[in-house]
Image (cartoon, grey):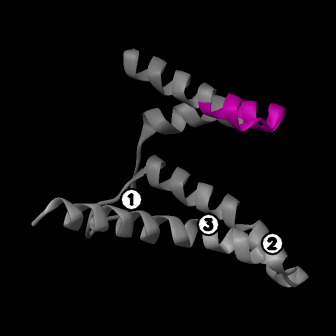
Amino acid sequence: MNNSYYLLTLFGCAAVTWLPRVLPFVLTKAFALPSAVEKFLSYLPMTILTALLLQSLLTFKSGSFPSLRFPEILACIPALIVGIRTNDLMKIVLTGVVAIALLRLL
């Protein structure tokens, strides 16, 4: 295997990673989506974030019910309060990181 093989592999991986992420933005700029599709797509960020949050709050084991991770749940409480009051994602993330760091320190 020579350097050109690695270079082509690198460019191929970059294209496969880049195209599915950028192409939808380019295509939706070219034409307008129906309002039903736009309404459906408006729920996707919230559902993705909810799935990521639940994945971090629960421990999944095969053959049993999910169990709770109590330090992470306790760290979510101040982050939730900051989120309700400010609606600023950066403040929410920083509050959650500081809260979990303090809980792990104790």
Vertical comparison of 83 with 51: above or below:
above
Inspect the magenta stretch and tell me whether residue 94 lies in it. Answer: no
The amino acid type, in three-letter code, at marker 1 is Pro
Quadrant where the N terminus lies? Answer: bottom left
Task: Check disc 3 and report its element: helix, strand or loop.
Answer: helix
Task: Out of 81 and 40, give the one closest to the viewer.
Answer: 40
From what the image shows, is residue 81 above or below residue 28? above
Dot 1 falls on a residue whose secondary structure is loop
The residues colored magenta run 81-93
Residue 10 in percent (x, y) is at 32, 61
**Residue type, mark 3 in image:** Val
Q: Residue at x 62, y 26 (%)?
A: 95
Q: Which residue is label 3 attached to?
A: 22
- Badge 2 or badge 1: first in the primary sequence: 2
Where does residue 77 sit, x and y in percent of width and height?
63, 34
Would you name the residue on which mark 1 appears? 66
Q: Quadrant of residue 89?
A: top right
